[in-house]
Amino acid sequence: MAIKGRSSFTVAEPWAVPVWPSTAPTPADAELHYGVLADELVLRFPSPGGRATVSVAINTPEVDYVYVLADERTGAVLGIQVDNLRPSARRRHPAWGRLAQPRPPLTAVADFLTDVTALFRAYGAGDAPPADDGRPADSIRGD
Amino acid sequence: MPTRWQVEDARGRPVELAEAGWSHIIEHHRDDMAERESDIRLAVEAPDHVNADVDYAQREVCYRSLGRGRRFVRVVIHYQPVSPQGSWRGRIITAHLTFREKRGEVRLWP
C-alpha cells in the first residue's frame, strides 16, 4: 500500500522465493551441524562462502519447523535448517532423530534430504508455491 | 563459560550471550550473522515482539525487523530461574534471519 504523498516502491526480495538446486546435493558433500543446546540442525550444501542466507520456512500445515536457507541475493537454496529437531523427530519424522547423534550415517542424511526435498515440492517455501509434481502431500513419509 | 555481553530484555530480565552461544550462531549461520551481533542485541533489548517457543516451555523468541523488506532477526533465549531470589536469567542459544514469525508460536509481548 502506497503512503499518500510518497512514491511506492517494490522491495526486491529474491530470497523470499527459494529455488531448489537443479542438481541434487549429495549427502557426502553436505556439511551437517547439530547444536545440542539449541536443538537446531543445519545442513549446508556445497557452495562458495560469503553468501548470506535467510531462513525461509517450508509451508507445512499449521506449524513451521523446517526451513530452507535461501541466498539473500538469488534465492538459491544453500541449505536446510530444522528448529527443535528432537520434538520434530518425535512428532513427525522419527528417522530424523538419528541426525542428533555424532557422525550420523550417510543413509540418515540421504533420507533427510529426500524428505525435505519432498516437503519443499509439496508445500513450497515462503512465496514459492508448491511444485506441481502430481503427488498428494500426504504421501510424504512422516508428515 | 565466558560472557560476551549482557543486556536486559523487554521485561527487565538479564539476558546474556555467552561465547558458546556466539560460537553456535557463527557455526550454524556464519555468513548471515557474523556481522549482526548488534542486531541480536537490539532484538533482545528492544524487540518488535516476543513469542513463546512452540516446544520448549522455558524458551522465548524475540523478533526485530531489519527495516526495509520483510526480514527479521529471530533470537531464541532459554530462561532459567536464579536462586534464591526467584528471578529469571536468560541465555541466547541461537539467532538467525527469517521472514516471518514461526507459525505455532504464541505471542507473549507486547
Image: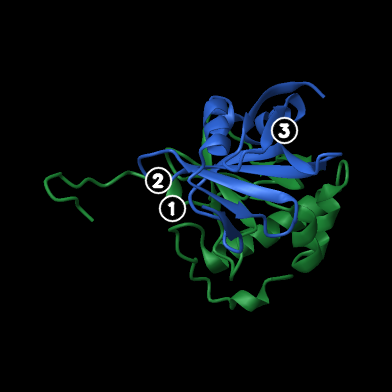
Chain colours: A green, B blue
Position above or below: A96 against B11: below
Tell me the residue at 11%/46% (across/down).
A5
Given the image, on which type of amino acid does mark 1 rest? Val
Same chain assignment for discs 1 and 2: yes
Residue that mark 3 sits on: B24
* Any part of residue A27 in sight: no
Task: Write down the chain letter for disc 3.
Answer: B
Which residue occupies the foreground of this view, A115 or A82?
Answer: A82
Q: Secondary structure at mark 3?
A: helix
Q: CA separation, marks 1 and 2?
A: 6 Å
Dot label at residue B29: none
Q: CA separation, marks 3 and 1?
A: 27 Å
| x and y percentages locating residue B92 in the rendered image | 69, 37
**Total number of numbered discs in the rendering:** 3
Tell me the residue at 19%/52% (across/down).
A2
Rendering quarter of residue A37? top right
Tell me the residue at 54%/24% (across/down).
B35
Task: Write down the chain letter for disc 1.
Answer: A
Which residue occupies the foreground of this view, A47 or B45?
Answer: B45
Q: Secondary structure at mark 1?
A: loop
Residue that mark 2 sits on: A14
Given the image, on which type of amino acid does mark 3 rest? His
| x and y percentages locating residue A106 in the rendered image | 82, 48
Q: Secondary structure at mark 2?
A: helix
Given the image, on which type of amino acid does mark 2 rest? Pro
Dot label at residue A17: 1
| x and y percentages locating residue B31 in the rendered image | 57, 30
